[in-house]
Image (cartoon, helix red, strand yellow):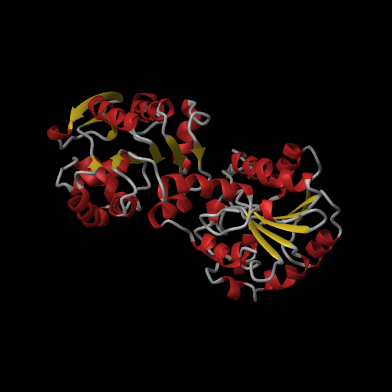
Amino acid sequence: MLEEYGIKTLDDVNVSGKRVFVRVDINSPIDPSSKKILDDSRIREHTEQTLRELVSKRAKVVVIAHQGRKGDPDFTSLKEHAEIMGRILGVKVKFVDEIFGSRAQEAIKALHDGEVLVLENVRMWDGETKSAKAEDHAKSELVRSLASYVDVFVVDAFAAAHRPHASLVGFMPVAKHVVAGRVLEKELRALAKVRSKPERPCVYILGGAKAEDAADISEAVLSQGIADYVLTGGLVANLFLAAKNRDLGRPNVRVLEEKGFIELLPRFKEVLDKFGDKIILPVDLAVDFNGTRKEITVESLPTDYLIKDLGTKTIDKYEAIIKRAKSLVMNGPMGVFEIDAFAEATKRTFEAIASSKAFSVIGGGHTIAAAAKLGYMQRVSHVSTGGGALMEFLSKGSLPVVEELKRFSK
């Protein structure tokens, strides 16, 4: 039982011999030309933590998931996902290229105890991506077609929990039991430690190129007394610096314009005016000076060169703050870590987190990619599977699917 949320878990239900529908998020990077999976980490996470337990308890497991969006290069079948699951489990995982038609239903009915069936990419059905309440989705073709087969519905897709789509919430009103899976349970327990009751000092580190939510998250965690400091890097730092009336120089302003971030400057200024002493900005930066790293002070802005990393004095300052922290959250790399010359701030930030005694959470696709490349995946307390879901949870303290799960957990 997840007591702080009032949500039941797999510990609270007997799954032996039961048909257990599991909504996972195994949305994976796909090679656009071959359609092959490039990284199976999400598949591995759900398979090893939740599906393996259900198989060992002799449940009849039906997996529901999505891959990409219609029209996007990564929109494809879940057949390879099922094959990877089978290799991880060491058993054959069945797959049917249907979501809720007669062949899918027959495959579900034919399942034996301890077997796993993966249904086709649920987003191939147009009704999946409508956002609605659980009761409305329960009337959909998907749920009406499969409801009679569901004994237990397991919600395990934290990374998609910010979207109340049909397969995520629609089975909640009709299933005999509704519980959180192990991945979702692990995420919620970890995030409670840095969101609802963090040990102090609590430090949030926000960077990367996806800076749209950074101002909202900063305000949320500072206004509610969750975080003591917010350290900034990447485009998040550039936006706060620009909001502070720092002219970054034409090449860097152009980047903000191309991403549509210029219109965010009033919002960043508003947050900076409220919490300026708690939002820590760079004092120096590293620019790409004709292919080499050159450090400049913030006072010397504007620059004719692209800002690609934090400077040494800023990193020293951040390390000192991280060293004193008891709770740490990092979302977004500090610089362009893909280029060795500009990976310094990201690497040293990870090293400071790994060396600290704080409970640490990292998340977001680029953050995880940086941690994997630089060798820090095993040196933090919790690696979140969520990107957008993580950001929304940190900002609001919950997610639409989690709220529905609270209502229907039984």
What residue occupies the far front of the structure in this picture? 3
Tell me where residue 359 appears, x and y as whole percent.
44, 36
Camera-side residue of 348 and 265: 348
Q: Which residue is drawn at 55% across and 58% down?
A: 71
- Count of numbered tags: 0
Tell me where residue 112 appears, x and y as whole percent.
86, 53
Locate residue 167: give its quadrant.
bottom right
Q: Quadrant location of the C terminus?
A: bottom right
34 displayed left or right of 212? right
Asked if one can make out residue 3 in the rendered structure from this viewpoint, the answer is yes
Tell me where residue 92 appears, x and y as whole percent.
81, 43
230 displayed left or right of 51? left
89 displayed left or right of 401? right
Camera-side residue of 45 and 410: 410
Q: Residue at x 60, y 74 (%)?
A: 135
Tell me where residue 248 appears, x and y as whole percent.
19, 41
In this view, 60 is above or below 330: below
Q: Which residue is drawn at 29% across and 39% down?
A: 231
